[in-house]
Every structure is written in C-alpha cells, then in structure tokens.
Amino acid sequence: MRRFLWYIAKALQMLGLLIVLMGILIALSNPLGETEFRAETRNAIIGVVVFGVGWLMERKTGGR
C-alpha cells in the first residue's frame, strides 16, 4: 500500500509541474495580455498546491 501511495505522490508532483509549465506556455504565447497573466498566476498557484500535496504524501509514506 505504501508503494502505491508513493507512486500517487510522484504522479501528483509531476502533474503539479506540468500545470506550472502550462501556465508558463500560456504567458509566452502572448506576453502583453492581462487574461494570460491571470491564467498564468492561477496555473502557478494550482500547480504549486498540487505539487505540495504530492510532496507531503511522499514524506508521509516514508519515501521509496
């Protein structure tokens, strides 16, 4: 069960990084748009939260 939770935690970390990357790509597509800035900020916050949940899960399971 611990190994399964570890894989879930790693998947959440990867998902968080992908969400942040998506926000960066949105910002680079049109650097002067305010709508893109809001989307980038929202994606950055959501990505950090998702990554943080995965990181905390990994710590709780005791690593690999």
Image (tube, rainbow, N blue to C red):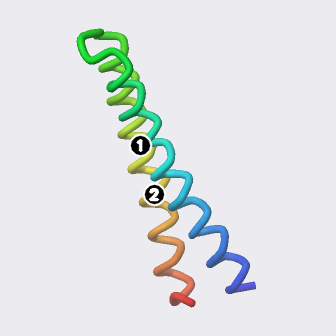
Residue at horizontal 50 percent and vertical 47 percent from the top: 18
Residue 9 rendering spot, x and y as whole percentages: 58, 69
In the rendered view, does 10 fall on the left or right side of 1? left
Instruction: Say which amino acid is labelled 1.
Output: Val
Q: Are marks 1 and 2 in contact (CB under 8 Å)?
A: yes
- The spot of residue 30 in percent (x, y) is 33, 15
Please, what is the three-letter code of the amino acid marked with disc 2?
Answer: Phe
The label on residue 20 is 1
Seen at 51% across and 65% down, the residue is 54
Q: Which residue is mark 2?
A: 51
Q: Nearer the viewer, residue 44 or 30?
A: 30
For marks 1 and 2 on the same chain, the one whose residue lies earlier in the sequence: 1
The tag on residue 8 is none
Image-quadrant location for residue 41 = top left
Q: Front-most of 12 and 18?
A: 18
Vertical placement of 16 versus 8: above or below?
Answer: above
Residue 6, located in which quarter of the rendered image? Answer: bottom right
Disc 2 is placed on an element classified as: helix
- Residue 50 position within the rendered picture, expressed as x and y whole percent measured from the top left: 49, 52
Gap in angstroms between the C-alphas marked 1 and 2: 10 Å
Residue drawn 53% across the image and 59% down it: 14
Residue 32's image quarter?
top left
Looking at the rendered structure, the secondary structure element under dot 1 is helix
User: 40 or 55, which lies in front?
Assistant: 40
